[in-house]
Image (cartoon, helix red, strand yellow):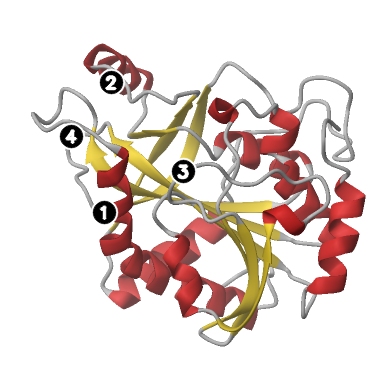
């Protein structure tokens, strides 16, 4: 693997983390502040992990935080790598492969996204049901890595049982949670109005620049996946307002509190059932 020895990174984290994690949550742009809700936290910056480059995007602090969210043990990945930074896909998905090596069973991904569906506005939360890879790169290209699956089944990249759990928790908390398809593009520019129209015709409800490579590798390794998009803006052409990264970060700060409550509820229910595929 280019630049990252997954086993060495996993061994390093195994020695630093206070417990063996069963679930890892990747926090997208503007959501790193959720780490403040973690109690008894142990923090390890990306730069400390052998082979990991520093995170170079505003809103991504670049650290692992292990601790307890509403009493449930969790490993938060505060920040991620993106292909648009110039990182090869091997680096983009390295944290997921490290999670696999640590024994993680469930991967929960979050991201900031632009709304393609006209009904989605800033601050709305979307449960990801499916995904479209428009980065035109696959993290599984090249030699088969430890996942062992050259052609993983992607008929249900996001676990239906976990989705049902998330919807039930959202209803219990009074949090509106819509369902839709997430499209990933390479970036880093925001989409044109024509591209937004194209994405809508392809069946996308939200668009961003992450998540799909990570979920693809996680599914190839057999992890169960759950995903949430936090809509930070309407896609170009759907609103007269210009789009900027500062807006993404600010909406993340405001709406991230609701997503934090939702994550806490989901994690609590999963922990109570031992992360069983028969989550009630």
> Is residue 160 rendered to the left or right of residue 117?
right
Which residue lies under the disc numbered 1? Answer: 251
Q: Quadrant of the C terminus?
A: bottom right
Mark number for residue 129?
A: 3
Which residue lies under the disc numbered 2? Answer: 196
Q: Quadrant of residue 53?
A: top right
Q: Position of residue 10 (x, y in %)?
A: 85, 57
Disc 3 crowd, CA 10 A, few/some/many (<14, 14-19, 20+): some
Residue at image point 55% right, 60% down: 162
Disc 4 crowd, CA 10 A, few/some/many (<14, 14-19, 20+): few
Residue at image point 50% right, 71% down: 35
Mark in the foreground, 4 or 3: 4
Q: Secondary structure at mark 2?
A: helix
Mark in the foreground, 2 or 4: 2
C-alpha distance separating marks 1 and 4: 18 Å
C-alpha distance separating marks 2 and 4: 11 Å
Q: Position of residue 173 (x, y in %)?
A: 31, 76
Which residue lies under the disc numbered 4? Answer: 118
């Amino acid at each position: 693997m280019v630049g990252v020895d997954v086993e060495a990174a996993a061994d390093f984290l195994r020695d630093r983390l206070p417990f063996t994690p069963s679930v890892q949550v990747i926090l997208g742009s503007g959501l790193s502040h959720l780490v403040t809700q973690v109690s008894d936290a142990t923090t390890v910056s990306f730069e400390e992990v052998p082979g990991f480059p520093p995170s170079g995007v505003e809103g991504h602090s670049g650290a692992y935080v292990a601790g307890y969210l509403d009493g449930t043990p969790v490993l938060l990945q505060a920040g991620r790598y993106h292909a648009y930074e110039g990182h090869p896909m091997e680096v983009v998905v390295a944290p997921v492969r490290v999670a696999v090596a640590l024994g993680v069973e469930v991967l929960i991904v979050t991201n900031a996204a632009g709304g393609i569906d006209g009904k989605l506005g800033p601050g709305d939360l979307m449960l990801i049901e499916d995904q479209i890879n428009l980065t035109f790169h696959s993290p599984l290209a090249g030699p088969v890595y430890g996942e062992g699956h050259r052609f993983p089944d992607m008929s249900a990249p996001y676990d239906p049982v976990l989705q049902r759990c998330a919807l039930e928790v959202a209803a219990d908390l009074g949090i509106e949670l819509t369902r839709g398809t997430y499209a990933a593009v390479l970036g880093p520019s925001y989409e044109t109005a024509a591209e937004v129209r194209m994405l809508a015709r392809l069946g996308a409800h939200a668009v961003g620049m992450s998540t799909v490579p990570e979920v693809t590798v996680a599914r190839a390794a057999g992890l169960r996946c759950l995903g949430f998009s936090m809509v930070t803006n309407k896609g170009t052409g759907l609103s007269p307002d210009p789009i900027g990264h500062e807006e993404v970060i600010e909406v993340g700060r405001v709406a991230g509190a609701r997503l934090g409550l939702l994550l806490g509820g989901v994690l609590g229910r999963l922990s109570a059932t031992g992360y069983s595929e028969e989550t009630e």
